[in-house]
Image: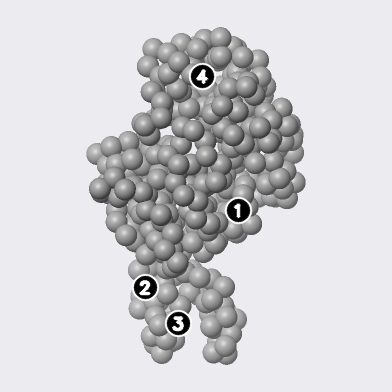
Amino acid sequence: MDRVLLQRRLEERGEPAYRAGQVWAGAARGVTGYSEMTNLPGQLRGDLEYEVPFSTLDLEREATARDGTVKALFRTGDGHPVEAVLMRYRDGRRSLCLSSQSGCPLTCTFCATGQMRFGRNLTASEVLDQALHFRRAEPIDHAVFMGMGEPMLNLDSVLEAARALPDVGVTWRRTTVSTVGWLPGLRRFVDEVEEPIRLAFSLHAPTDELRSELMPVNDRYPLADVLVQCERYFALRRRKVFVEYVMLRGVNDRVEQARALASLLDPKVFKVNLIPYNPTGFYEGSTRKAIAAFKEVLDRARLPATVRLTRGRDIEAACGQLAAIGPDGARPS
């Protein structure tokens, strides 16, 4: 819900100051509408139905993968498409992948979102409403800002949403904000965020030359400058930075590139997450043998590394696949 509009309407009605907290508490625990908030006066519940929509997003469609992953396509009030994902794991974890923008202006070549038309930044309420949608179905306990968009380009809304997630069931220590290396926002994140929110860095190449081919943002903010900020994050918080590295066949998956990556990253600061490439039509994914050989190099260098478990690939809900593609294959404008 639009928490700013809610606060304004309640103040205009002369409601007690605690009313906004009551409404938010109900939404955060997963109620499906104002009618279930029986701690509010009946007249107020009815009036809020008309004055403050229960969600800032309209659900357009939802798909469930064979592994239980759920992808939802929403529309903002002004018509922009937004996708978010619920990932269900066998150990009981329920993790959300949240979007911070409709589309993304940074055009990483391997990412389907970057090929969309960029819409706009999302408000904090629009980010939270992605989480609330899934919370109404079941409890959630992890969240990553790795969906559509570059979170550091919309840092104020991302942080406002992240700071409210504990009310929904996701602690700050189980919340991760990802970046491709947008330096102004990353500096602010390192300098200003006091909560123990985790940081992830989308690296994907061990050299500036290759990284600039894959990710145009690297021309503006070179690798060395971004790594300095990641190292500052670790120095200030003593929490490792997750490094995301998508495995592209014949592009960035050779053993010598693994050695370069191991030389680049301090094992005390970074933990690498190798991501099998999820098809978006631009590259081929690395073979299992190539991924295993790459990881073996990192293991020998004592650089912590894992291989990400792919979720939701059959509904185009996996990492890098969010593009709001319709059943006919068309991408919404």
> Along the line of sight, which residue is nearer the eye, 222 or 307?
222
> Which disc is residue 51 wearing?
3
Q: Nearer the viewer, mark 1 or mark 3?
A: 1
Residue at 36%, 49% (x, y): give it.
331
Q: Nearer the viewer, mark 3 or mark 2?
A: 3
Q: Nearer the viewer, mark 2 or mark 1?
A: 1
Tell me if 206 is positioned left or right of 95 in this view. Answer: right
> Which disc is residue 252 wearing?
4
> Which disc is residue 17 wearing?
none
Q: Are marks 3 and 2 in contact (CB under 8 Å)?
A: no
Residue at 62%, 47% (x, y): give it.
152
Work out whether mark 1 precedes mark 3 in sequence or the reverse, and give the earlier one.
3
Q: Nearer the viewer, mark 4 or mark 2?
A: 4
For the C terminus, give its image quadrant.
Answer: bottom left
Q: Amino acid at mark 2?
A: Gly
Distance of label 3 from label 4 (alpha carbons)? 52 Å
Q: Is residue 180 above or below residue 97?
A: above
- Badge 1 is on which residue? 154
- Badge 2 is on which residue? 33
Work out whether mark 3 precedes mark 2 in sequence or the reverse, and give the earlier one.
2
Tell me if 116 is positioned left or right of 202 in this view. Answer: left
Work out whether mark 4 precedes mark 1 in sequence or the reverse, and give the earlier one.
1
Helix, strand or loop at label 3? It is helix
Helix, strand or loop at label 4? It is loop
Q: Is residue 143 above or below residue 243?
A: below
Q: Are marks 4 and 1 in contact (CB under 8 Å)?
A: no
Distance of label 1 from label 3 (alpha carbons)? 27 Å
Work out whether mark 3 precedes mark 4 in sequence or the reverse, and give the earlier one.
3
Q: Residues within 10 Å of mark 1 (few under 14, many from 20)?
A: some
Residue 246 picture location, percent across and down: 48, 27
